[in-house]
Image: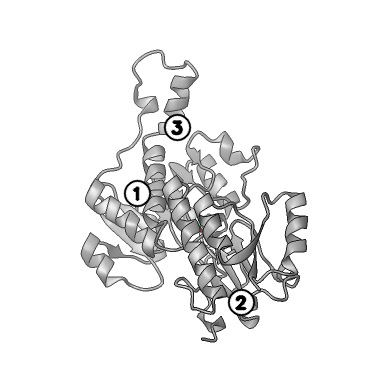
Amino acid sequence: MNKQVVLYKKLSPALMTRLQQHCDVTLIESLDADGLMKLRDALSGAHGLLGASLKLDAALLDLAPQLEAIASVSVGVDNYDIDYLTRRRILLSNTPDVLTETTADTGFALILATARRVVELANMVRSGQWHRNIGPAHFGTDVHGKTLGIIGMGRIGEALAQRGHFGFGMPVLYHSQSRKPAVEARFDAQYRSLEALLQEADFICLTLPLTAQTEGLIGAGQFALMRPDSIFINISRGKVVDEAALIDALRHQRIRAAGLDVFEREPLNHDSPLLQLNNVVATPHMGSATHETREAMARCAVENLLAALAGEKPANLVNPAAWQG
Ligand code: DGY
């Protein structure tokens, strides 16, 4: 009998065919109230789940007694209770590597957009407010040659460092759990304590995962250490930052600007104070959102799931303790 897979993210025809060659697939088209009801029903027979952007907590997964594997179409795994999955020997896989470069591109898009006020000035042109050559009131600040501070030196942090060092001649500072000698040698990067990095960097970029240790890492105390001309970029997870403290820092010009791809609550409420501030560039959690990369992520997730359901170790296993070999 084929394994039952519940998809809660649409796949390209090629990937759907690949999955259907090996499994019986139930597709949940959308995660609205109706879709969630369908998902709950489908869980009872599911051996595998594949999707993203849904908190799969114990209350939901208790409805899936036969579940063997979850393939997340994301690198972040903060939507899963890993201890619970491991206790149940459910294999969780993610999609690292394939999104690294694209997500770092998004980070740099936010660096450039905030520093050069791209969105604000483009809106000025679009709304017919460009009447004469712009003057100092509309000038931005340079990116090249400025100090790039990266908090969380994983794959995406490294790809940012590469862009900053080789592309923009930026001195690179970083903070992470451990020193990275290879990164230091390649990008001439210097390790700093969190406090020192916040004080020294022109651009402060968060690229670290959301965990119990990183939740709320950047709050009022940390914004107070940043320089008034510094720019804050978040392409990791919204909950790493105390959003109220960020809004306060922006409102009181304690920092120059913020480029944000992630928020405490997503989608961001249209009446969020962040959207009232000209010095904020807010994007819709689009770090990895290109056609090529999203297809590569989905392909990676499909292969992880097929391997797990075939009794093989998935290439991107997040909880090796659940693997019984
Ligand atoms: C990821 O892959 O974790 C991205 O942030 C999309 O959720």
Q: Where is residue 277 in the image (x, y as percent from the top left)?
A: 54, 36
Give the residue type that dot 2 points to.
Ile
Give left or right: position of 228 versus 52.
left
Give the residue type that dot 1 points to.
Asp
Say if mark 3 contacts mark 2, CB within 8 Å: no
Residue 119 numbered mark, or none: 3
Q: Quadrant of residue 176?
A: bottom left
Q: Position of residue 122 (x, y in %)?
A: 43, 26
| Marks 3 and 2, how far apart at CA | 44 Å
297 to 251, vertically: above or below: below
Q: Mark 1 points at which residue?
A: 202
Give the residue type that dot 3 points to.
Val
Q: Quadrant of the image for the N terminus?
A: bottom right
Q: Position of residue 2 (x, y in %)?
A: 63, 71
Say if mark 3 contacts mark 1, CB within 8 Å: no
Cβ of mark 1 under 8 Å from ligand 1: the answer is no
- Please, what secondary structure does the residue beneath circle 2 have? loop
- Please, what secondary structure does the residue beneath circle 1 have? loop
Give left or right: position of 134 versus 270.
left
| Marks 2 and 1, how far apart at CA | 43 Å
Q: Name the residue under label 2.
A: 90
Give left or right: position of 125 versus 249.
left
Nearer to us of marks 2 and 1 is 2
Q: Which of these two is toward me, 233 or 255?
A: 233
| Marks 3 and 1, how far apart at CA | 20 Å
Tell me the crowding category of disc 1: few under 14, some 14 to 19, or many 20 or more residues within 10 angstroms, Cα based: many
Nearer to us of marks 3 and 1 is 3
Closer to the chain start, of discs 3 and 2, is 2
Residue, x 69% and y 67% (percent of image)?
57
